[in-house]
Amino acid sequence: MLSKNFKFILFSAVTSLFLTGCESVKSAVGIKQSKVWIEKINFKATANANDSSPIKIHVVVAYTENLATEIGKLDANAYFQKAKKLKADAGDDLDVFSIDVVPDSSVSLDIAPSHSAGVVALMFARYTSPGDHRTNVSADYEIQVDLDKSDLKVTPIKKG
């Protein structure tokens, strides 16, 4: 029969390992904590958004640091030129969620990443005017995106 002191020491050790070792265990078995929380994007386009032309939107979720770095260097124009090749080369390391938003409309896009350990989520908007037209949308659960004549504005609704 185990002594009370030994049981207490064993209980304390197991509890301590559980409470302080979660990060170590996750690291040891390769579980990564996601940096991507976005679940829903609500779009509202003004009547003169993109000179009254539809705006193609891509939300891309990268699952590797290298891919996140590569995509993070691109403005919207460069991204859309390379989008098909990026997805073909990345395979399961990249999710792409796409929607076309027409002027003077409101629409929502649900984001359901295929992996639980996204590194970054970037949104690219294909405007006819010059500019970056991209933003990091990783940190919040739900956002409002206002699409104006020549650019976009993001407002968090439900913070991550």
Image (tube, rainbow, N blue to C red):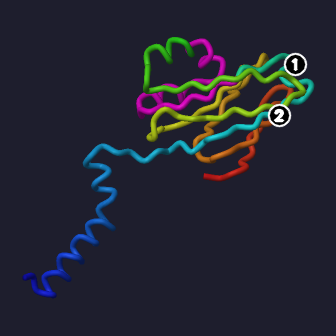
The x and y percentages for residue 65 are 42, 34
Position of 4 with respect to 107 (left or right) is left
| Residue 47: quarter of image | top right
Identify residue for label 1: 51
**Residue shown at the point (57%, 45%) measured from the top left:** 37
Of mark 2 and mark 1, the one earlier in the sequence is 2
The x and y percentages for residue 22 are 33, 59
- Badges 2 and 1: C-beta atoms under 8 Å apart? no
Residue lying at the far bottom of the rendered structure: 4
Indicate the amino acid at tag 2.
Lys
Does the magenta segment cover residue 76? Answer: yes
State the CA–CA distance, disc 2 to disc 1: 15 Å
Boundaries of the magenta span: 57-82
**Residue shown at the point (62%, 16%) measured from the top left:** 80
Q: Which mark is residue 44?
A: 2
Q: Nearer the viewer, residue 133 or 142?
A: 142
**Residue shown at the point (70%, 27%) measured from the top left:** 133
| Residue 105: quarter of image | top right
The x and y percentages for residue 136 are 61, 38
Does the magenta segment cover residue 115? Answer: no
The x and y percentages for residue 96 are 57, 24
